Image: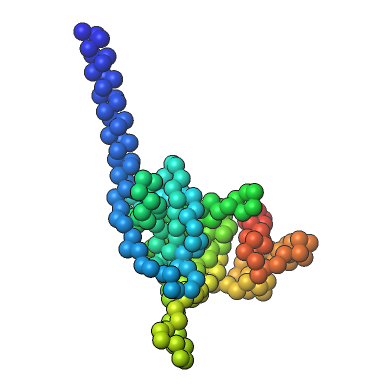
């Protein structure tokens, strides 16, 4: 009798585990194939990276991927898609994506790029728009990049020339939850931060920072967040 009860408990636990695993799987497999458009005659790419990149994501229902999937970020549609592990088909999420991280190979190593939604009161965006989180802390440095399809008439050509181009590339400092647009120069950044300017100016000079680059701009904001 005790043996039967033990078997029953084991079966029940296994059933619960499988059910939970199935529910977890369905959280992101509730998706649909992306309508693939032939871009062979179009210059450039609508994606951040044309190749698939391994990454992780969190959906608005709270589900967070534990294993990496191959991801692509479409900067025209502002949409994250993933490569179905079994079929290789490009899929889009039905449940909105809250944030995602890409692990991008570089030489013998790799670096991470993180994108988030939820920012409000920013021109040409909605709370569902993706922003790259370049520096995180009491002050956040975020970037919004948008691409578009440009069509131009070429004299003597039978068809229009089409290519994907960068529509805009904008930077913001988020201070006390308020996004402040900045330019990638010392005056704009120090004015927006409005404190610790002597320390920041010294840090820029000592470290020979080039604030036109994301890497050095991130170092400056990371430093500010330690003050």
> From the viewer's perspective, is residue 162 above or below residue 225?
below
- The picture places residue 100, in percent across and down from the top left corner, at 46, 53
Quarter occupied by the N terminus: top left
- The picture places residue 21, in percent across and down from the top left corner, at 32, 36
- The picture places residue 158, in percent across and down from the top left corner, at 41, 86
**53 sits left or right of 205 in the view:** left
Residue furthest top as drawn: 1
Residue furthest right as drawn: 206
Considering depth in this image, is 89 or 222 the residue closer to the camera? 89
Answer yes or no: is residue 206 visible: yes
Considering depth in this image, is 21 or 98 the residue closer to the camera? 21
**105 sits left or right of 177 in the view:** right
For the point 36% across and 67% down, the residue is 37
- The picture places residue 220, in percent across and down from the top left corner, at 66, 61
For the point 63% across and 56% down, the residue is 222
Quarter occupied by the C terminus: bottom right
For the point 40% across and 84% down, the residue is 159
> From the viewer's perspective, is residue 5 above or below residue 66?
above
Colour setup of the view: rainbow
For the point 43% across and 76% down, the residue is 149
**36 sits left or right of 49 in the view:** left
> From the viewer's perspective, is residue 23 above or below residue 92?
above
Answer yes or no: is residue 120 visible: no
Considering depth in this image, is 6 or 178 the residue closer to the camera? 6
């Amino acid at each position: 009798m005790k043996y039967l009860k033990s078997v029953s408990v084991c079966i029940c636990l296994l059933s619960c585990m499988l059910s939970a695993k199935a529910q977890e799987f369905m959280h992101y497999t509730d998706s649909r194939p992306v309508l693939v458009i032939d871009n062979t005659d179009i210059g450039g790419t609508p994606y951040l990276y044309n190749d698939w990149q391994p990454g992780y994501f969190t959906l608005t229902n709270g589900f967070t991927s534990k294993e990496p999937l191959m991801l692509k970020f479409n900067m025209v549609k502002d949409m994250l898609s993933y490569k179905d592990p079994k079929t290789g088909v490009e899929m889009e999420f039905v449940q909105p994506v809250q944030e995602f991280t890409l692990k991008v190979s570089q030489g013998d190593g790799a670096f991470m790029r993180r994108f988030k939604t939820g920012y409000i009161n920013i021109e040409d965006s909605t709370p569902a728009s993706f922003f790259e989180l370049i520096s995180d802390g009491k002050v956040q440095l975020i970037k919004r990049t948008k691409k578009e399809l440009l069509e131009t008439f070429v004299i003597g050509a039978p068809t229009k020339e089409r290519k994907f181009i960068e529509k805009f590339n904008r930077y913001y400092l988020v201070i006390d939850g308020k996004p402040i647009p900045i330019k990638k120069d010392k005056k704009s950044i120090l004015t927006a931060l409005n404190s610790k300017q002597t320390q920041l100016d010294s840090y820029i000079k000592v470290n020979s920072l080039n604030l036109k680059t994301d890497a050095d701009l991130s170092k400056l904001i990371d430093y500010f967040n330690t003050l």
